[in-house]
Amino acid sequence: MANTKDKRVAVIGSGLAGLSAAHVLAQTKGIEVTLFERSAGLGMDAGSIAVPCECDACAATSTAPTSAARSSSPTSSPRTATHKHFEGRIDVPMRSFFPGYYPFLTSLYDSLAIPYKQSDNSMAFFSLAAPTDPSLLFHSPKSFPTKLDLNLPDSKEDLSADAPQKSNDSFFSFSCYKLPPPVNNFFGIPDLPSLATLRQSPADYVATVMRSYQISRDYIKFLQYAVYCLDSGVIQQSKEGKGPLAGMTFGQCIKKLGSGYSDAFWSVFLPLFSGACTCTFDDLKAFPAHVILEYSAICLPDGKMSFVTCGTKEVCDRLAGPVQNVRCSTTVIGIQHNKTTNQFTLTTVPTNQAHLPSVDQTPTTSAFDYVIFATQANQASRILKQISTPSTALPTADAENNSIYSTFVTKAIQILDRFPYTKSLVVCHTDQTLMPTSRSEWRCLNFGVLEKHTKDHASAVGLQKSHEEGYDVQGLAMCTHYSQMTQTEVPDTVPPLFQTTNPIVLPDPKSVISATWYERAIVRMDTGDAVKALKDVQGGGGGVWFVGSYFGDGIPLLESCVTSAMMAARGIVKDVYGGEGDELFMPKGMVERVAEHELKIRGKPGFVDTQSRRFGMFYFVFGVLALVLAILAWFLGTLLL
C-alpha cells in the first residue's frame, strides 16, 4: 500500500543515466527527487564547448584560438568585419546514435520533443604519418586532470603553421548521399581514386580500386553473417550461454571466419570499432563476439547515424525540468542508513571544500528513502569504499543500525569492481595535421592508425593489464570528427573544427580549444555475469540502486544509461506502491518501441530467409558491378601505360 508521505530519492550524478532516472521518478506521484552533481553544471553537458566565434567583438575578448593563431588552414579566410556573431556549442564527447539500436533513448527523446536527425556518416581511414621525433607521439600521464595542458616537449621538429604537413594518406574512404522521400536515408558509396591518379600511376589506381572492392565485398558479407546470427536467434542463444557463439570472443570469431575475409577489410573494420568503443584493438577482440555482431546487424545495414540538433545542454534542461531539487557544485562525502527509521542520511559539502580538512568544511545533511548511484561503476565503488572506511564509520553504538556498512556494501563493491574501464582523451582543436592530407578526403569521421591492423593481429589476444596510464598509441585508432559535417548551422566564417578521440600525435597547442579525459566501460566475457550479479543486489542495503552505461547487455552506450535508469526507477516504484510498478511515469511510446526492438533482437520466425535472400541478392549484384568496374579500370590503365 502506498505511503501517504512522499518518498525522497537521492540521485548521485547527472549524466544521462541520472537525469533519466530523476526525470521519470520526479513525475511519479508520491516521489520527490534531489539530484546531486559535483560539477558546476549538469554532468551530461559538462565537457561541451562553445563554438569559437569569429566576429570582432568576440575575437577581442575571447581566449580561444583565433584563425590567425591556429594551425595552417588554407581554406579558411582571415577574420574580417563582415563576420556575423554566432552562438553555438559542440557536444563533447560526440553523441551519435542509431535509432534502431536505441529504443529507450529515442522514445525518451521523442516524448520530450527533442529533435534529432540523420547525419552524413561518411568515413575515411588513413595511415598516420608519425613524427620524426618519437617524443611527439602522445604518451598519457599517470594523473588525469579534467583539462590537459598540451605543452609540446622540446623538439627540433618544425610544428609551426608554415611547416609542410606530412602525408596522412587515406587508404579507404566512402561518401554519403541522401535519398529523397519516401526512402529518406543516407547511403554510402566507396570513393574511387581520381583520374589524375590513373594518369600518373595506373598500377596504383587499379590497386586502390581492387582494395575498395575487397573491403566493400567483405563488408556486405560480414553484415549478411551478422544479420543471420541475429535473425536466427544465434546471438540470443549466446547471451544465454548456448549456441555456436557461446563463450567466443570477437578475436576468436575473426579467426573462425578465416580466409574468407581480406586483410583490407579488417584494416578498416577494426579501426572503426576501436573508435566506436574507444578502446585498443586487443580490448576490442576481447569483447564477446555476440556484442559486436548484434551492434553490426542492427546499426550498420540501415546506416541511420543520428545527432540531437538542439545540443546536449537542451537535453539536460528538458530532462532536469521536472526534478524538484537540483544541487550542482555539491559533493557527497557520507551516506548512512538507519534500519530503525529505514532512511538514509546523506552528508554533502560544496565541491570546492571536498578536499579540505573536515574542520574547514561546512557539511549539510539530508534524509532520503532511496539512493541511486548514477556514476560509473568504478566511481560508485570508490564512493562506497570511502564512506565505509574505519575513519568515517559510525560510532559502535550507531553502527548496528546502519545497514550501509553491512554485507551489502562489501558485495556491491566486489561486483562493481568487475566492470573494467579504459581512459580516453577527447581534444577539440583546429589542427588539420590530424586529418587526411588532402582536404578532398576529409569525411565526417576520420580514423587514423600508425599501422594497418589486419586479421593476423587477431591470432592472440594480449589485453592491456592496466589502463591507469592511459592508452597505447600503437594499438588503437584515433577518430577525428569533422564537426561542420554534422553541425551544418555553423557559418562558413568559422574555421574547420575537429574533435579527436584518443589522439595518437599531439595537435598544435595553439589550435587546442579543450582537452578532457573520460573513462569508458569495456566489455569482457564475464561482464554479462557481473551485470546479472548487480541486478541481484539492486535495492539492497536499505534501498541502494545503480545505473549507468556499463549496466547493460551490449556495447556501453547511451541506451544502457536509459535502460538501467528505467529499471531502477521501476524497482523503487514497486517498493513504494507494491505490484509491478505501474504507477511509474513512462515516456510516451517507450513500451511499444521497446517491445518491437525485443522482437527484433530475439529473432523473427520466417524472417531470416527473407533477410538473407535480400543481402544475398545485393551481394551478388554488387559483386558483378564492382568486378566490371575493376576490369574497366584495369583496361583503362593498360591503355595509358
Image (cartoon, rainbow, N blue to C red):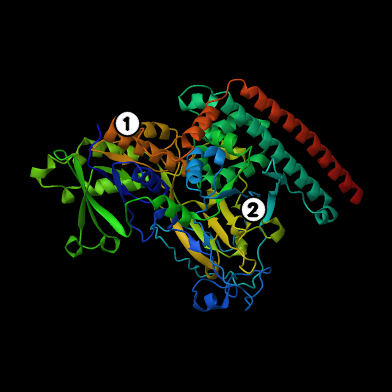
Amino acid carrying mark 1 in the image: Asp
* Residue nearest the viewer, comparing 136 with 639: 639
Q: Is residue 147 above or below residue 269?
A: below
Q: Is residue 233 above or below residue 571?
A: above
Amino acid carrying mark 2 in the image: Ser
Most extreme residue toward the right is: 639
**At numbered mark 2, what does the secondary structure look like: helix, strand or loop?**
strand
Of marks 1 and 2, the one in the foreground: 1
Q: Residue at x 34, y 46 (%)?
A: 26
Q: Is residue 73 above or below residue 393?
A: below
Q: Residue at x 48, y 22 (%)?
A: 242
Whether the residues at callouts 1 and 2 have beta carbons within 8 Å, the answer is: no
> Can you identify the residue that label 1 sits on?
536
Q: Is residue 168 above or below residue 239?
A: below
Locate residue 181, reporting x and y percent.
70, 43
Q: Earlier in the sequence, mark 1 or mark 2?
A: 2
Q: Residues within 10 Å of mark 2 (few under 14, many from 20)?
A: some
* Residue nearest the viewer, comparing 589 with 326: 589
* Cα–Cα gap, marks 1 and 2: 46 Å
Locate residue 119, reporting x and y percent.
62, 50
> Can you identify the residue that label 2 sits on?
127
Q: Residue at x 49, y 33 (%)?
A: 594
* Residue nearest the viewer, comparing 101 with 93: 101
Locate residue 128, reporting x and y percent.
62, 55
Q: Would residue 245 appear left or right of 528 to someone viewing this image?
A: right
Specify whether residue 67 is in view: yes
Residue 371 sits in quarter: top left
Quadrant housing the N terminus: top left
